[in-house]
Image (cartoon, grey):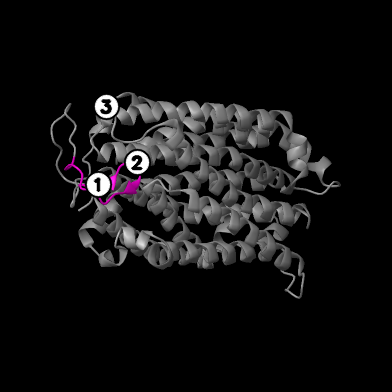
Amino acid sequence: MTNVDISYRRLGRIAGPVLIANLSYTAMGVIDTMMVGRLGVTALAAVGLGNLIAFAALSFVWGMLSGVNTLVAQAVGARDREAVARVFFQGIYLAALSAVVVSLFWPLIQGLLAWIGPGAGVKLIATDYMRIRILGCAGVILLWTVDNFYRGLGRTRLMMWCGMAQLLVNCGLNYLLIFGKLGAPKMGAAGAALGTVLAQFLVALFMLATVLWLGPIRREFEVWKSWSFRPSLFGRLLRLSLPIGVQYGLEMGGVTVFTALVARLGEVELAATNAVIQAWNVGYMGGIALSVGATTLVGQCIGAGERGAARIVVGRVMRIGYLFTVAIGALYVLAPNQIMALFVSGEELPRLLPFARPLFSVVVVCLIFDLKFNILSGALRGAGDTTYSMLVNVLSAWLLFVPALLLVTPRYGLIGAWSCFILHVFVMALGVDIRVRGSRWLHRPRHRPLVPGDIDVTGSFSSVEADAERSDPSSEQLSAPVVD
């Protein structure tokens, strides 16, 4: 009997809203693609290219900020009210620093696009799109920070509603700015970028306000008492988060090489790839949502000293993941024509279908292994084991995926390039599976509470005095707390 609620019901309460929120965020990219696709194949290819490269620039930060999820979850499991607020503010300081660093990428945009080598029309549109996304990065970085804070608490319903609100705001702004409606300037693809940036910024400010001013979080955690910068804790957050950031950053670096090679195949190939990737993101975000559930519940189990329960969490998340993969995979296999029709006008559809249709079969195979890698990596992150999955991902990306792309793409074209994804995700899934089958990852240094008895490890704080920190009777007491 575990003291942490690891039931399917609680897993659903965490992962379900995250899935809906992630799908809302993904839908923003899908809607950008759908709306811009009405402007023609050139605009569709350009926005897809700009979106991928902009996210590649931001992916390092996306990974870095997920460390907030891990440390908050472990503080919850260890019944440490004060540490929860401390981690939140260190995450805010990390977000501010990250926004400054990402903005320095702006002068490199033209040089990077020149290296990728798309056609002149695609390059011009993609440059405008990327400049707006990079200059407006502060909103999405703040959004990710608060998002990970709520994930660590296991309270994800607010994120779901904010994600849907962001989607609606983005749709409205896109309509105004892409097509110049209701007196707004007609900006084309650049309007899609501006609409996305403004929607992210508005929702990020609201979510920040729910922690600092509007909601019960401020009183429950006495947030403002812990606002000061703490070098020791900030350093621990960096040490935990850097491997995750490197993992995501170098992974997206490999995807950038993939995009560059596809762009050189032709405008139609790039447009088809963009549309299929947007559809793939729906399935991918399901795996990410489940990985968040794994990170949060494993982190709380480790914080509470219940390592056996952490293994049970992994098995339950994987079972849900396979059911989701079967459902989404069937959609990709049975309805590729209908999916592609969402992204391009009727007269352009016959040009893209011959290229896009076989790519959906590749996506289905990739989803199976990608799901396993994401969920098991999420479990490792919850335990504070972030370096191993980084090494597996980076080594596979740069010693296997990129060399295979360079060898196969010139000879076998678009299908050859996409098939390299299968090899990549298979090797990554195999690598993390070996780690999780062992026990070393369960014995990472874990959090020890400053103030015991403040929290009910189902995720909500209690005023009732509880027992002091529980230890795992099956192993010796571990040193070096994750949060101090």
Residue 8: quarter of image: top left
Q: Position of residue 302 (x, y in %)?
A: 27, 37
Residue 455 falls within the magenta-colored stretch: yes
Q: Which is more N-terminal, label 2 or label 3?
A: 3
Tell me the tag on residue 483: none
| Kind of residue at disc 2 | Thr
Q: Nearer the viewer, residue 148 or 248?
A: 148
Q: Nearer the viewer, mark 3 or mark 2?
A: 2
User: How many residues crowd around disc 1 within 10 Å: few (fewer than 14), some, or many (20 or more)?
Assistant: many
Tell me the tag on residue 79: 1
Q: Residue at x 44, y 36 (%)?
A: 11
Main secondary-structure element of the magenta-colored stretch = loop
Q: Which is more N-terminal, label 3 or label 1?
A: 1
Confirm whether residue 415 shows in the render: yes
State which quarter of the image contains the N terminus. Answer: top left
Residue 161 falls within the magenta-colored stretch: no
User: How many residues crowd around disc 2 within 10 Å: few (fewer than 14), some, or many (20 or more)?
Assistant: some
User: Between marks 1 and 3, how big is the CA–CA gap?
Assistant: 24 Å
Q: Which residue is mark 3?
A: 439
Q: Position of residue 111 (x, y in %)?
A: 55, 61
Q: Which residue is mark 2?
A: 458
| Kind of residue at disc 3 | Ser
Taking the image as shown, residue 175 lies to the left or right of residue 255, namely right
Taking the image as shown, residue 154 lies to the left or right of residue 123, namely left
Q: Secondary structure at mark 3?
A: loop
Q: Secondary structure at mark 2?
A: loop
Q: Nearer the viewer, residue 69 or 350?
A: 69
Q: Which is more N-terminal, label 2 or label 1?
A: 1
Q: Which residues are magenta?
A: 453-469
Q: Residue at x 46, y 38 (%)?
A: 397
Q: Position of residue 432 (x, y in %)?
A: 38, 30
